[in-house]
Image (spheres, rainbow, N blue to C red):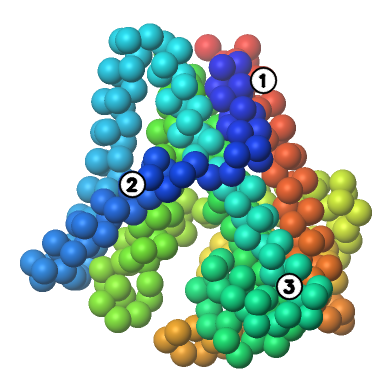
Amino acid sequence: MTHAAVILISALVLDLILGDPPLLFHPVRLIGTTISGAERIFLRLGWSGLIGGTVLTSGTIAVSLGLYLALRIFLGRLHPVIASVLDLYLAYSFLALKDLLEHATPVAQALTRGDLPEARSALQKIVGRDTSSLDTQGVARGAVESVAENFVDGVLSPMFWYTLVAVLSHVFGCPSPAAAGIVGMLTFKAISTLDSMVGYRREHYLLFGRSAARLDDVANFLPARLSLIILYIGAVFSGERTRDGWRIALRDRQKHPSPNAGHPESFVAGALGVRLGGPTLYPHGEEEKPWLGAGDEEVGPQHIRRCCRLVYRSSLVSVLIFSALLLWSSPLLP
């Protein structure tokens, strides 16, 4: 279990130093390429309904895990250290803290300069909404919402599933909890990638992407709720409004159309003293989202920076908590 904890801590350190690996060698890109190819085949065959989407979802997860386990067994026979390097590389690849913060920073910088078109362009790279008509507050609000929501999907959930599966594997006598943790991480990232590519609630994806969307909701269910505690601790170290964050989260977290996104977004809205959500324009049309928060401050570049600081420190809290759980479980479990 000590080895599993070292892998997790080292993965976050590498992510903060290096950011995402090159696209050519990024495992999530390989998963995405597999999904795209399979999707074209399925749609050509007319398997565009719920069954086809379910087969795509289960097949993507099975292939991803099968390739990882086969490669790890092969490398482990060459030398255990090489297998550990593979585990570390994958864990590092599945965390996205540095890129999350670095994609939000240009939005804040452009808004500080008063360059609204550049801010819209920078925001468009990290959100799915139409940014062409957003005012300064709309751009800043979109950046804060994106950072808050992706804290769960890009940092907290991968750590959660790594730790949970590693601990459970230790309970059942698995010789390599770190490898089991990677299985948990890889399964989550496969589900998350499927959801981002086919988990839409419109057009032919309404049925085809339902399995991926529902699985993603399940995979993020516990981490999203755990994020309230993690963000609360992070807010203590960031000097943000912890009581307001907790109060607004308890009041507004269920208002969001997503069963999970409202939890971190509502806490961040309260902690920063702003309102998030509201009418949002997407390429397919406008969605009337409820408002989260009760703040009266105008959302601006300073709130993007404060949100990034809060998420950064909350991520450090996360890795410390999960690493401690891995270490403490070693002597306590058989």
Q: CA distance from mark 1 to mark 3?
A: 45 Å
Q: Which residue is mark 3?
A: 110
The residue drawn where x is 65% and y is 37% is: 17
Callout 3 amino acid: Ala
Q: Which tag is nearer the camera, tag 2 or tag 3?
A: 3
Q: Which residue is mark 2?
A: 30
Q: Earlier in the sequence, mark 2 or mark 3?
A: 2
Q: Is the residue 300 above or below the residue 199 in the image?
A: below
Residue 258 or residue 187, whichever sits in front: 187
Residue 199 position within the rendered picture, expressed as x and y whole percent measured from the top left: 37, 66
The residue drawn where x is 28% and y is 18% is: 74
Helix, strand or loop under label 2: helix
Res. 172 visible in picture: no
Q: Quick one: label 2, few (<14), some, or many (20+) residues within 10 Å?
A: some
Helix, strand or loop under label 1: helix
Residue 201 position within the rendered picture, expressed as x and y whole percent measured from the top left: 38, 76
Q: Which residue is mark 1?
A: 328
Q: Quick one: label 3, few (<14), some, or many (20+) residues within 10 Å?
A: some
Q: Quick one: label 1, few (<14), some, or many (20+) residues within 10 Å?
A: few
Residue 208 position within the rendered picture, expressed as x and y whole percent measured from the top left: 26, 68
Q: Position of 233 compared to 288: left or right?
A: right
The residue drawn where x is 83% and y is 68% is: 302
Helix, strand or loop under label 3: helix
